[in-house]
Image (cartoon, coloured by chain):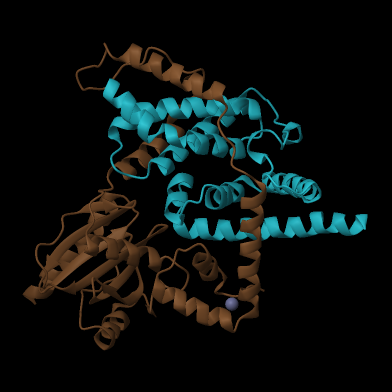
Chain colours: A cyan, B brown
Amino acid sequence: MDDKRGRFEAEVLPHLNAAYRFARWLSHSPGDVDDVVQEALLRAFRGFDALRGSDVKAWLLAIVRNCHATALKQQQRRAFVPLPEEHDPRDGYAMIAATTDPESASIRRDDARSLERLLSALPEEHREVLVLREIEDLDYRAIATITNVPIGTVMSRLARARAGLKARWLTEVEGERRGVR
Amino acid sequence: MECAESLRVQAYFDGEVDALSAADIERHVEHCAECRALLQDLEQTRTAIRRDLTPGRAPPELHARIRQALDQETAVNTPRPNRWGRTTWRTQPFWVGALGGIGSAAVAATLAFLVLSPSITNPLLDDLVAAHVRSLMPSHLTDVVSTDRHTVKPWFAGHTDVSPVVADFAQQGYRLIGGRADYLDHQRSAVVVYQHGAHVINVFSWSASRGALPGNTTRGGYHLAFWKAGDLEYCAVSDTGWDELLGLARLLRDLSSRDDRE
Ligand SMILES: [Zn+2]
């Protein structure tokens, strides 16, 4: 048992940050993220004996996704309506990349906030593939495993997510800047 | 509105194509302004996301909560394994009651298919899975599209030195959709493509010249079923269930042995 715990800490816990990020991107109510991640890690621990030499990160993220779906169902049963606007983009994963130039830092912060908001506004099935590809740097196969769809679907969702983000970015961010000048 | 190659260009951008297809796509991009613009967009989006959204980290309180939960889990379960080695859970998280069938079934399915992936390397298995995945890319599935075995079978004669059994099993749920020539482990192979529900099944065949045929296995989430018939070796690859895959294998074997007798 101690050995299992040790192996779990060595092989699965290093992916805790990825699990947390993914849960954040899936969820519209930040308060539930910790519960979802904790439940996912517990389930992963219980199923860990059966896992042998495969992609631990993809496996864990698939569990996170299932836990999120279950929590969401539970929430909907409590007739709780999530309010994405309450979600503070500076909190957690949307921290701004460090830079030495204060002016460009402020532009970047605005860009990051818009990007964060635009990404959050994508339909969930588009958002999740884009996050898994660009932020978690996973390949199509792993993304297909996690989202439980064929690779062809991953490819078309990814294309639509990217096109959608680009279009929103262009109309919103670039439009605003031109308006300011 | 959109270039038909756009998904392949995206796959190229994501590093999901082999060297041969990459060269092919590069040639296309050279004379397709739309795909050049697409590549630029993909690069810009990636740069913006990776530059501006720095990775978040789980807060220390969450680390602590998880360790505590694992401590509890270990303490509770150590003394109580039942005789099948499974454990009885005494503590339940707050929403376990709501788990129902679907979520846990999906986790179980994911687990099952990850668990079955062997980590040993075998070039033939790697080639089979790579060729199967490649075939799922748009416009890569078939070289000859036909539901008629009298079209597919002669096509192979002109394109490979392999002449596999070809038949449409639409009535049994396996629709013949075409054929393709492919390379496996540096050897020419003929591929017969079937559709079963939403799944594609590639049936590879090659001259039986190598050593022992691998046993049925699962790799990267795909099942591979092997058999030998006459002077050919076959492998059916798909992400269907084992029952569905072995069902097609059985039909094809039966057909081969009938052909032999005739
Ligand atoms: Zn093009």
Determine the residue positioned at 55% across, 39% down.
A22
From the viewer's side, name the closer residue of B167 and A46: A46
Q: Is residue B87 left or right of residue A127?
A: left
Q: Position of residue B233 (x, y in %)?
A: 16, 69
Residue at the limit of the structure toward the left, as seen here:
B261
In this rendered view, identify the residue nearer to me: B75 or B255.
B75
Residue found at x 81% / y 54%: A172
Where does residue B41 sit, x and y in percent of width and height?
A: 65, 65
What percent of the width, then of the height, locates residue B27?
Answer: 51, 82
The answer to whether A95 is drawn above or below residue B182 in the figure is above
Residue A84 location in percent, x, y?
A: 72, 35
Q: Quadrant of the C terminus of chain A?
A: bottom right
Would you say A15 lies left or right of B82 here?
A: right
Q: Nearer the viewer, residue A20 or B60?
A: B60
Quarter location, residue B202: bottom left
Q: Quadrant of ligand 1?
A: bottom right
| Quadrant of image for the N terminus of chain A | top left
Relative side of B125 to A104, left or right: left
Examine the image and state in which quarter residue B248 appears: bottom left
Q: Residue visible at 22% across and 52% down?
A: B120
Single out the residue that lies furthest toward the bottom: B158
Depicted B170 relative to depicted A26: above or below: below
Residue at left 51%, top 39%?
Answer: A18
B57 shown above or below B262: above
